[in-house]
Amino acid sequence: MVDFKTSILQEQKRCIFCGKPPSNKNKEHVIPKWLIELTGDPKRQWNLGVQTNHPDRKLRKYAADQFQFPACEACNSRYSDLEGRTKGYMSDLLAGNNLTAEAWDDFLDWFDKVRIGLWLGNMMLNKDWPIPEPNFYIDQRVGQKDRCVLVYPNEPEAQVLNITGASDPMFMYLPSSFMLVVNSLVFVNISSEFLLSARMGFPYPRKTSVKGTRRYVSDFTATFNARQPFLRFEFYPPLWAVYQTVLLEGSLDAEDYKPLVEHEYIASKRIGGGRTQICTVSPDGVKFHAGGAPVEKAEMADRV
């Protein structure tokens, strides 16, 4: 157990969405109740690491539906519609149905919400560790960084909910990826600044520097040409793989960024703010999808 404070989360309750002291205190289920009920008994016990400040390092145990964290009532309500839509997306995917590009864009917002929620939630649970000071919360991260999700098959009749990676020590400092197993599907979610930009032909910095805890970028360029693979890591071919570059919305008018964003290659793929079209790759090449276009599941023959 540490005898010093390294984070505001060790001293104060903060809303998991906005980062302020909770107003009209509420609780947020980082893993939503609909997903817990979809995957088994909502009262089943989860083992969430050990109590590091206990001399016997007892297991930290929760009923699944009690895995919740502080939130403002208004903040919690703002995300209720997203949860409702995501429940439908998950049902469609589990049934083997395709989603539209617009739905995948929305679904990626939900993965941002859950990934950052798990990051903050685990720090709140482990406040006796030297945890980092969070410089963003859920509101500041949804739809703000390059992101992707890869979907794989699990056992067809499985009824399970597993989370992998979100309790690792590295995740405390770099909450960029985790894996979620939901019954017959496995989801790998990855998100980070400029994760995909260079390989997808979008603006990326040639110069980076770090001062304290902040990263500074400059000297932007772009190839205006997509090059596979987007991720330079060999993944087993998924059922669905969707990629999305998110432009720096606060820099859209910057002198070295605006001309790149106005290039026809990029302008034709913008869908609002910093978001760009959902992209997929196949043996036929790279494809960007308009909002209502279905993103089709890969055929098994293409995955071996």
Image: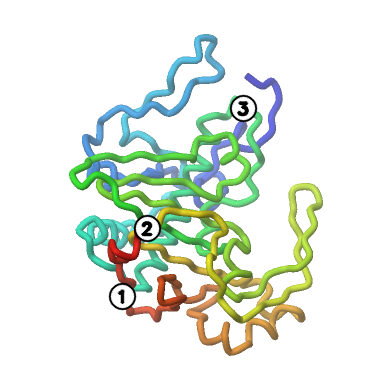
**Residue identifier under label 1:** 294
Q: Residues within 10 Å of mark 3 (few under 14, many from 20)?
A: some
Examine the rendered structure and indicate whether residue 100 appears above or below residue 58. below
Considering the image in quadrants, where does the N terminus appear?
top right
Q: Amino acid at mark 1?
A: Pro
* Residue type at tag 3: Trp
Q: Quadrant of the C terminus?
A: bottom left
**Residue density around tag 2, few if under 14, some if 14–19, many if 20 or more, within 10 Å:** many
What secondary structure is marked by label 2?
loop
Q: Residue 39, can we see it?
A: yes
x and y percentages locating residue 10 in the rendered image: 61, 32
**127 or 290, nearer to the observer:** 290
Q: Is residue 96 above or below residue 264?
A: above
| Image location (x, y in percent) of residue 162 | 35, 39
Which residue occupies the foreground of this view, 103 or 73?
103
For the residues labelled 3 and 2, the Cα–Cα distance comes to 36 Å
Q: Residue at x 34, y 34 (%)?
A: 66
Q: Is residue 210 left or right of residue 246?
A: right
* Mark with earlier residue (1, 3): 3
What is the secondary structure assignment of the residue under circle 1?
strand
Which comes before the other along the chain, label 3 or label 2?
A: 3
Which residue is drawn at the image coordinates 52% and 42% (left, top)? 119
Q: Which residue is mark 3?
A: 129
Q: Amino acid at mark 2?
A: Pro
The tag on residue 238 is 2
Q: Single out the mark in the foreground, 1 or 3.
A: 1
Label 2 vs label 1, nearer the camera: 2
Are the two marked residues, 2 and 1, in contact with CB atoms closer than 8 angstroms? no
